[in-house]
């Protein structure tokens, strides 16, 4: 009777095994989207590293599915806790970079489209380059109204980025 209770507590259901295998496959697919330099930083076992590189070259859907299953199988022998931590950190860093880009782009767009937004920008980000900023905004607005190439819009983006990052 005591053995049965012990077995019930320590056995894992097939559903749980399948869910764990799917999580490993999903993590493997996330690895396949990384650059080679980032993959090298992870110090993966050579067979897993080669399987991921092979997966990046595959175009057939059926072959991708089989390869992702194989990667999941290889990952069973690999401690994924540290890998999950690293991937989470990288995902958060990428998210912060995207938010930073959107903030800069939002300010650039507001400065061109809303004439009064320059005051809000200068209150939030005081700078000595006020005249350069005003001239660049003026040129970007003219550029937009005349449907010219967005040269000054690019310059304005760079200037706003420089001011925000100070």
Image (spheres, grey):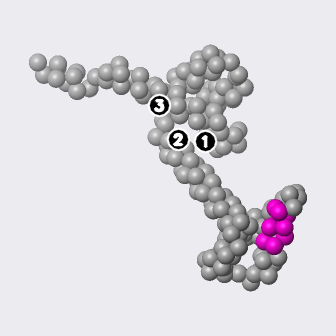
Q: Residue at x 65, y 62 (%)?
A: 106
- Asked whether the viewer can see residue 105, the reply is yes
- The residue drawn where x is 58% and y is 23% is 68
- Of 144 and 7, nearer the camera is 144
Q: Between label 1 and label 3, give the one nearer the viewer.
A: 3
Q: Nearer the viewer, mark 2 or mark 3?
A: 3
Span colored in magenta: 137-145
Relative to 5, 35 lies left or right: right
Residue farthest along the left direction in this orientation: 1
Question: Looking at the rendering, in which quadrant would you find the C terminus?
Answer: bottom right
Count of picture labels: 3
Q: Residue 154: x percent and y percent? A: 81, 61
Residue drawn 13% across the image and 22% down it: 2
Estimate how packed mark 2 is, as few (under 14), some (14 to 19) or many (20 or more) residues with alpha carbons within 10 Å. some
Q: Residue at x 22, y 21 (%)?
A: 7
Circles 2 and 1: CB atoms closer than 8 Å: yes
Q: Which residue is mark 3?
A: 23
Q: Could you classify mark 1 by the number of other residues whose Cα lies within 10 Å: few (under 14), some (14-19), or many (20 or more)?
A: some
Q: Which numbered disc flags the more N-terminal residue, 2 or 3?
A: 3
The residue that mark 1 highlights is 42
**Can you tell which quarter of the image residue 161 is in?**
bottom right
Label 3 secondary element: helix
Q: In the rendering, at what x and y percent does residue 158 appear?
A: 77, 65
Residue at the far bottom in the pictured view: 128
Look at the numbered disc 2 and give the secondary structure of its residue. helix
Mark 2 lies on residue: 83
């Amino acid at each position: 009777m005591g053995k049965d209770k012990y077995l019930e507590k320590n056995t894992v259901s097939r559903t749980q095994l399948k869910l764990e295998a799917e999580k490993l496959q999903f993590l493997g697919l996330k690895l396949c989207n990384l650059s080679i330099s980032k993959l090298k930083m992870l110090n993966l076992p050579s067979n897993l590293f080669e399987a991921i590189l092979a997966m990046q070259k595959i175009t057939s859907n059926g072959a991708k599915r089989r390869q992702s299953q194989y990667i999941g199988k290889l990952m069973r022998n690999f401690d994924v806790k540290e890998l999950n931590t690293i991937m989470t950190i990288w995902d958060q860093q990428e998210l912060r970079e995207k938010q930073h880009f959107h903030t800069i782009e939002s300010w650039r767009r507001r400065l061109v489209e809303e004439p009064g937004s320059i005051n809000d920008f200068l209150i939030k980000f005081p700078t000595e380059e006020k005249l350069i900023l005003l001239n660049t905004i003026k040129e970007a607005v003219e550029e937009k109204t005349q449907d010219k190439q967005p040269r000054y819009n690019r310059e304005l983006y760079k200037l706003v980025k420089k001011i925000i990052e100070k």
